């Protein structure tokens, strides 16, 4: 397939570029859904000067895979886990295994752009399902499973479902996913991307990992880039049946995750205090920002992640530029077919107070 047919993934604005363009020293980056905090235990490990940098990392990090398996629960073991250079790499493995020029992938509209990119690299046909258009639904513009099902053809081999979803922040109940999976032919592989799962309430929002033993065509992917605060180290993982994971290992390079990523992930997943504090900060920032949006009559989409996507209308570019000039970087969403929306990541209390102040000033509200 010609490269011109593949939309290039565009990450959030680079901090140094914004500093140079607007001659601003202090930049608040709220564009890439990163955790604003770093685990002290991870920092202590990274700052240790005695690292074996001359040696290759562990090619089979069984200890980390076992720790992950225990953490996700549902009687998973290390053979149910595969590590990747970010969960993106796991998505690539599954796509390479599943798709070719005679197959189709179904991707819900407003999904993570990487799904389309990696599917097109396999020359597969992209089929886009419609979002939920019910404006009264908490799932507004999120995934409509009925539309996904209606798009299935004899050539469908892969379906991508992010839950919670980026950039909409919406969440589908596990019971709905269960019913959906039960209606599919086994030849269709389904990926449930749970990169933001840790921001949910585990008492009521259950993981699709609980369905892996029931559905042999199911993969779940997770990331250490979000609540665990390891975005720069690039590490994530996939979960599926032992048979599926064994086949997927054929696509993995021997040393695809580095020494720091492996050890930092091991430390971070066991740093329960850090994870809990990160979630508390996120919940507090989310609550405060929703209050402001309600005061300003600003519509926002699902609120299950560490960001909020909000509707600005025709002023979206103006607000984006205004915030940039104030040293605040948020995310425009033209690439996601949401040109009238912006996405803001949830930062520290100080960062969010600055963002809220500038938002009020833009809308001529007294601060």
Image: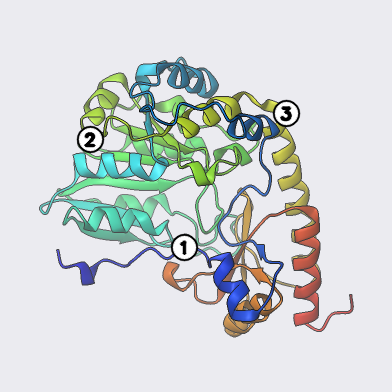
Q: Position of residue 200 (x, y in %)?
A: 62, 39
Q: At 27% across and 29% down in the image, what residue appears? A: 254
Q: Residues within 10 Å of mark 2 (few under 14, many from 20)?
A: some
Which residue is labeled 2 in the image?
251
Q: Earlier in the sequence, mark 1 or mark 2?
A: 1
Q: Is residue 108 left or right of residue 348?
A: left
Q: Earlier in the sequence, mark 3 or mark 1?
A: 1
Q: Residues within 10 Å of mark 1 (few under 14, many from 20)?
A: few
Question: How far apart are the two marked residues, 3 and 1, measured between alpha carbons?
Answer: 30 Å
Question: How far apart are the two marked residues, 3 and 2, measured between alpha carbons?
Answer: 35 Å
Residue 85 or 238: which is nearer the viewer? 85
For residue 43, which quarter of the picture?
top right
Labels 3 and 1 touching (C-beta < 8 A):
no
For residue 117, which quarter of the picture?
bottom left
Q: Is residue 88 left or right of residue 185?
A: right
Labels 1 and 2 touching (C-beta < 8 A):
no
Q: Earlier in the sequence, mark 3 or mark 2?
A: 2
Q: Which element is circle 2 on?
A: helix
Which residue is labeled 3 in the image?
273
Q: Position of residue 77 (x, y in %)?
A: 42, 15
Image quadrant holding the N terminus, namely: bottom left
Question: How far apart are the two marked residues, 1 and 2, measured between alpha carbons?
Answer: 26 Å
Q: At 46% across and 37% down in the image, what residue appears? A: 222
Q: Position of residue 205 (x, y in %)?
A: 59, 35
Labels 3 and 2 touching (C-beta < 8 A):
no
Q: Is residue 255 above or below residue 173?
A: above
Which residue is situated farthest in the left direction here?
102
Residue 195 or 145: which is nearer the viewer? 195
Q: At 18% across and 52% down in the image, what residue appears? A: 122
Which residue is labeled 1 in the image?
11
């Amino acid at each position: 397939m010609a490269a011109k047919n593949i939309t290039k993934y565009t990450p959030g604005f680079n901090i140094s570029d914004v500093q140079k363009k607007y001659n601003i020293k202090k930049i608040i980056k709220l564009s890439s859904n990163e955790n604003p905090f770093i685990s002290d235990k991870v920092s202590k490990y990274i700052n240790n000067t005695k690292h074996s940098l001359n040696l290759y990392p562990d090619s089979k990090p069984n200890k980390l895979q076992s720790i992950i398996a225990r953490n996700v629960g549902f009687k998973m073991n290390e053979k149910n886990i595969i590590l990747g250079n970010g969960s993106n790499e796991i998505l690539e493995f599954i796509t390479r295994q599943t798709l070719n020029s005679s197959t189709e992938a179904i991707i819900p509209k407003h999904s993570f752009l990487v799904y389309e990119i990696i599917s097109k690299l396999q020359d597969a046909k992209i089929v886009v399902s419609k979002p939920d258009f019910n404006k009264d639904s908490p799932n507004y513009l999120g995934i409509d499973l009925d539309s996904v099902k209606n798009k299935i053809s004899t050539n469908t081999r892969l379906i991508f479902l992010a839950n919670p979803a980026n950039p909409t922040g919406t969440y589908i109940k596990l019971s709905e996913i269960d019913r959906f999976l039960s209606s599919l032919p086994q030849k269709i592989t389904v990926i449930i991307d749970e990169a933001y799962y840790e921001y949910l309430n585990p008492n009521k929002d259950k993981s699709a990992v609980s369905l892996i033993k029931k559905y042999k065509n199911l993969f779940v992917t997770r990331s250490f880039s979000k609540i665990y605060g390891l975005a720069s180290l690039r590490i994530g993982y996939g979960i599926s049946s032992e048979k599926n994971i064994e086949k997927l290992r054929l696509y993995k390079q021997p040393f695809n995750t580095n020494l720091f990523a492996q050890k930092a992930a091991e430390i971070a997943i066991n740093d329960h205090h850090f994870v809990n504090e990160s979630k508390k900060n996120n919940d507090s920032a989310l609550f405060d920002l929703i209050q402001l949006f309600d005061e300003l009559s600003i519509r926002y989409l699902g609120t299950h992640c560490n960001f909020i996507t909000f509707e600005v209308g025709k002023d979206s570019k103006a607000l984006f530029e205004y915030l940039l000039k104030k040293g605040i970087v948020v995310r425009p969403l033209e690439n996601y077919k949401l040109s009238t929306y912006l996405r803001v990541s949830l930062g520290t209390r100080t960062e969010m107070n600055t963002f809220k102040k500038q938002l009020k000033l833009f809308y001529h509200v007294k601060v």
